Amino acid sequence: CFHASPELLARRRDEDSFGLKTARRESNKGKFKREKPPVEAAYVPPKPKKTVKSSQDKTVDIFEGMAVVELAKQSGASITTLQDILVNVGEKVDSEFEPLSIDVAELVVMELGFNVRRIHSSEGTEILPRPPVVTVMGHVDHGKTSLLDALRQTSLVAKEAGGITQHMGAFVVGMSTGASITFLDTPGHAAFSAMRKRGAAVTDIVVLVVAADDGVMPQTLEAIAHANAANVPIVVAINKCDKPAADPERVKNQLGAEGLELEDWGGKVQVVEVSAVKKTGLDDLEVALLLQAEMMNLKARVDGPAQAYVVEARLDKGRGPLTTAIVKAGTLVCGQHVVVGHEWGRIRAIRDMVGKSTDKARPAMPVEIEGLKGLPMAGDDIIVVDSEERARMLSSGRKKKFEKDRVRKINEERTENLEPSEDVPKRAEMPVIVKADVQGTVQAVTDALKTLNSPQLFVNVVHVGVGSVTQSDVDLAQACGACIVGFNVKSPPTSVSQAATQAGIKILMHSIIYHLLDDFGNLVVDKAPGTFETQVAGEAEVLNIFELKGRSKAKGDDVKIAGCRVIDGCFTRSSTMRLLRSGEVVFEGSCISLKREKQDVDTVAKGNECGLVIRDWHDFQVGDIIQCLEQVLVKPKFISSESGTVRIEC
């Protein structure tokens, strides 16, 4: 060793002797070698985290003449990103302050993956007063359609299946004063809640029809809620005042208790007592509606492109998709290119609700449009575009956005159900195909069938459509094991019916919503797997105890036999026995022997005496109660209320 001096050498020897020597730095050689093989643990996938509200749920407001910089501020995207998207959709923008058309802005926002809300300007060179749009709402069978028949001198009720309205109708009624009012008639059954909501969204005034002999009912309260949500004034029409049991004052008290400020009590809600059968009070109702419309000062832009709202849509065999719409602003002209939801087309013909052809439709005018490429959804907005190319682009973009949202929703539902709880039993699935006469009815029937979901059975609507049942529907039902529901459509051809019968496919054809829900509800109950419950099949009282002693080893130990009399129900040898003493359960076990008059029997009826032996139990006492238990398959119950609501109770 080489050291600077002998003192340092001596100092190092002292440190070694006292254990103060600094540990040498270990070499990295062999440091990463594993001495033992790694433990193979089962892979546990991480639990999916529930994400906060997705950015794709964001809604961007757009308007005509919106600059690129404004669109960037609204959407949160960079100007460079928006300019790239504009180039892709074929728009040349020189400056970020250059205004965009509302159609191009919608294409850009949909490309970003956001929802779009169009804000239309009410300004125009020609703004004129327009007729009010009045929606008639109320409980089922309170006389809504009868009241409209009395106003327009027709008889529509006689044409309705079952005497109840099951569609949404729009028509113009000319009053005796010369004024005209556009009426929307909504169904009152509980299954058509979405239709009533759409009617309240497009209307100016809601006429709430309440029967004087029936009072406020569930759909009456729902109509009030829809009107308040849409911020629409209400005019109350108390109908059936000619009946002996009519009590308008009771109806007023009920409405006041629900929060309506009636005019008789110092509020703003007008109340009119009418009779659709006797045609009394109709003039007062007309005055009330025109007075309410005059206070609202209803005006609309007449010039410029039209904005309209789809009330109903149906498929005609000769004319194709037909759309019933109400114009909100502007003028709808025959020959224009329109985009309705994710469908597009060129208006081939416009007809009023009487069936007369017209070239144009002005605000508050209900019309039937012909010429769309597909069937739109009830509630879609109708927008007018400049060219066929623009209509195609908008329709294609909306279809892509709709499909993306649908797939994303399905994935989110699957993610939430990745780890179901062990306590929740697996539900059986019942696939259904729904066919109806119009688009709004398809949605209403679909929503009504989904209300019959239960913990035991899931109603899965695999396909919906407008029109009669076809061979393709039967093929789809056969592929997925579905049943077919046809509502208010023609019976399928004989060939289709025979194909369905051979394939074992059930087809339910109905024209009244009550009968459809009852029939389908019973079918759901039959398809449900049910649950097994333990029930008491019989009870017996122990009268005496017998003991068999001195049995051989082959026959086993001593046995105690309970001598009983069956006091209720019957006893079965294969059942489980429960022993009660002073009202408390002492033991449960299987029956290994059941005899009557020294003969082995399988069952003992009420009033007879028997002897029985319970496995592993020998401590019988006189006065004990023995119950015979059996497993019973309990099916869910289909419950239909008077208001029309249905449910499955498990």
Image (cartoon, helix red, strand yellow):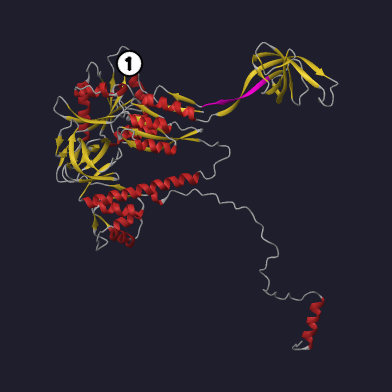
- At 41% from the left and 31% from the top, the residue drawn is 502
Q: Nearer the viewer, residue 378 or 63?
A: 378
Answer above or below: position of 53 versus 95: above
Where residue 590 sits, quadrant-wise, is: top right
Percent of width and height locating residue 405: 39, 47
Q: Residues within 10 Å of mark 1 (few under 14, many from 20)?
A: some
Q: Is residue 153 magenta?
A: no
Which residue is denoted by mark 1 in the rendering?
247
Percent of width and height locating residue 261: 32, 27
- At 27% from the left and 14% from the top, the residue drawn is 242
Q: Quadrant of the N terminus?
A: bottom right
Percent of width and height locating residue 301: 18, 42
The residue tagged with tag 1: helix, strand or loop? loop
Q: Is residue 42 left or right of residue 122?
A: right
Answer above or below: position of 578 versus 60: above
Where residue 370 sits, quadrant-wise, is: top left
- Residue at the farthest right position: 550
Task: Tally the marks.
Answer: 1
Q: Is residue 637 left or right of residue 8?
A: left
Percent of width and height locating residue 570: 64, 16
Q: Is residue 445 left or right of residue 623?
A: left
Q: Which range is magenta?
A: 627-635
Q: Main secondary structure of the magenta part?
A: strand
Name which residue type carries label 1.
Asp
Q: Nearer the viewer, residue 544 or 484?
A: 484
Where residue 19 sits, quadrant-wise, is: bottom right
- At 34% from the left and 31% from the top, the residue drawn is 495
Q: Is residue 101 visible?
A: yes
Q: Is residue 505 visible?
A: no
